[in-house]
Image (cartoon, grey):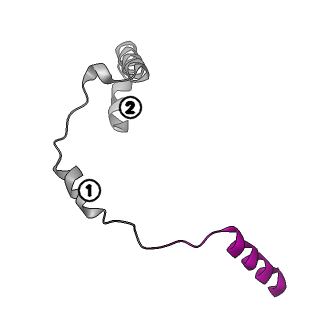
Amino acid sequence: MTEQNNRELRSLLKNAIPPVDPALPRDLWPDMVRKLKAPRSAVPLRRLPWYDWALIASSASVLALFPKFILLFVFHL
């Protein structure tokens, strides 16, 4: 590209993209501290989606049918 094309492209981009204000509207650290101090709850098993149960069942059945795959399965964990 020539210098003229570069200048045209630069001016088009400056016109198309609005300027960004780097200052945040508020301090995010208090929210982060509150989130870190909040108690963590484990996901109950009944709240797992159906596809997670299907993946667990298929993995268990493959390992039951083909026991030699256990080493391969453990290797990928």
Q: Nearer the viewer, residue 60 or 53?
A: 53
In which image quadrant can residue 72 be found? top left
Left or right for 28, reference 10:
left
The majority secondary structure of the magenta stretch comes to: helix
Is 39 above or below relative to 57? below
Q: Nearer the viewer, residue 52 or 3?
A: 3
Left or right for 64, reference 33:
right
Residue 33 painted magenta: no
- Point out the tag, 2 or 1, that comes first from the N-terminus: 1
Q: Nearer the viewer, mark 2 or mark 1?
A: 1
In which image quadrant can residue 56 be found? top left
Percent position of residue 4, x then y: 83, 85
Residue sitting at x 35%, y 19% = 67
Kind of residue indicated by mark 2 = Leu
Residue 17 painted magenta: yes
Kind of residue indicated by mark 1 = Asp
What residue would you read off at disc 1?
31
What residue would you read off at disc 2?
72
Q: Residues within 10 Å of mark 1 (few under 14, many from 20)?
A: few
In the structure shown, which secondary structural element does the residue marked by tag 1 occupy? Answer: helix
Q: Quadrant of the C terminus?
A: top left
